[in-house]
Image (cartoon, helix red, strand yellow):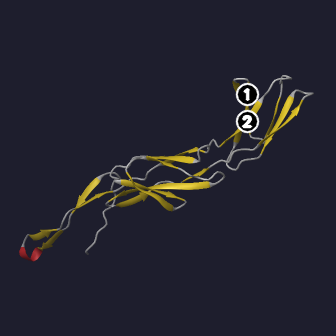
């Protein structure tokens, strides 16, 4: 035959192949082909860190032995190519949207895709407050945020800001407040995944 499949090779290892053509009719007459160098790429492992406040995602992946560059795909569309490092920040994303990312390690022998990572860019909650002067409480409520799995409630009085609750609900009652004191509240939506 004029082809052969080399098997049981190890990713990240450099191999060189050549073929020798032999004419056994004339004893040991032969002619060698050119040599071909091949490095099989291992599969990159991709992770993502989301910063919804700046609408960015930072991608990090394992360095792959033999890779000469990396490409980045967002929702299966190529968005960056020829990257020489193992990290990249994706900007200008849209709040309330989800995105999938993968990277491709590339060398002269071919390419291999990483795992796919899906992230959500959180929208800011809209907070409402209903004070009850008799009970010295404030009932706080906000909209559920797609992609958020917990909410942190913060209370500010003077120069002091305190986290007063972590909840999966879309409301919280701040209690033990002091009449005549000004309070500021905010809610932080969190995606802990």
Left or right: 130 in relation to 161: right
Q: Nearer the viewer, residue 85 or 131?
A: 131
Percent x, y of residue 106 = 37, 57
Determine the residue positioned at 20% across, 64% down. 18
Determine the residue positioned at 86% across, 33% down. 131
Q: Is residue 184 above or below residue 82?
A: above
Q: Is residue 108 above or below residue 127?
A: below
Left or right: 36 in relation to 52: left
What is the number of callouts on the image? 2
Q: Are the residues at dot 1 and dot 2 in contact (C-beta closer than 8 Å)?
A: yes
Quadrant including the C terminus? top right
Left or right: 169 in relation to 74: right
Percent x, y of residue 46 = 49, 49
Q: Nearer the viewer, residue 80 or 32?
A: 80
User: Dot 2: few (<14), some (14–19), or many (≥20) neighbours within 10 Å?
Assistant: some
Task: Indicate the quadrant where residue 136 lies.
Answer: top right
Instruction: Name the mark on residue 111.
Output: none
Q: Nearer the viewer, residue 170 or 67?
A: 170
Percent x, y of residue 20 = 17, 68
Instruction: Name the mark on residue 186.
Output: 2
Q: As drawn, which residue projects farthest toward the right?
A: 134
Q: As drawn, which residue projects farthest toward the left?
A: 26
Residue bearing mark 1:
156
Q: Is residue 5 above or below residue 173?
A: below
Label 1 SS: strand
Mark 1 or mark 2: which comes first in sequence? 1
Cα distance between the residues tagged 1 and 2: 9 Å
User: Dot 1: few (<14), some (14–19), or many (≥20) neighbours within 10 Å?
Assistant: some
């Amino acid at each position: 035959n004029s082809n052969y499949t080399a098997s049981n090779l190890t990713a990240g290892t450099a191999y060189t192949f050549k073929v020798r053509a032999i004419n056994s009719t004339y004893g040991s007459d032969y002619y060698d082909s050119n040599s071909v160098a091949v490095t099989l790429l291992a599969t990159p492992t991709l992770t993502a860190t989301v910063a919804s406040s700046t609408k960015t995602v930072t991608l990090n992946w394992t360095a792959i032995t033999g890779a000469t560059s990396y490409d980045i795909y967002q929702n299966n569309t190529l968005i960056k190519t020829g990257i020489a490092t193992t990290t990249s920040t994706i900007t200008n994303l849209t709040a309330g949207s989800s995105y999938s990312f993968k990277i491709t390690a590339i060398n002269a022998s071919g390419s291999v895709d990483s795992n796919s990572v899906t992230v959500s860019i959180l929208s800011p909650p809209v907070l409402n407050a209903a004070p009850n002067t008799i009970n010295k409480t404030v009932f706080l409520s906000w909209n559920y945020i797609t992609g958020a799995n917990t909410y942190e409630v913060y209370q500010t009085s003077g120069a002091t800001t305190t986290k007063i609750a972590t909840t999966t609900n879309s409301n919280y009652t701040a209690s033990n407040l002091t009449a005549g004191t000004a309070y500021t509240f905010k809610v932080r939506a969190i995606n802990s995944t």
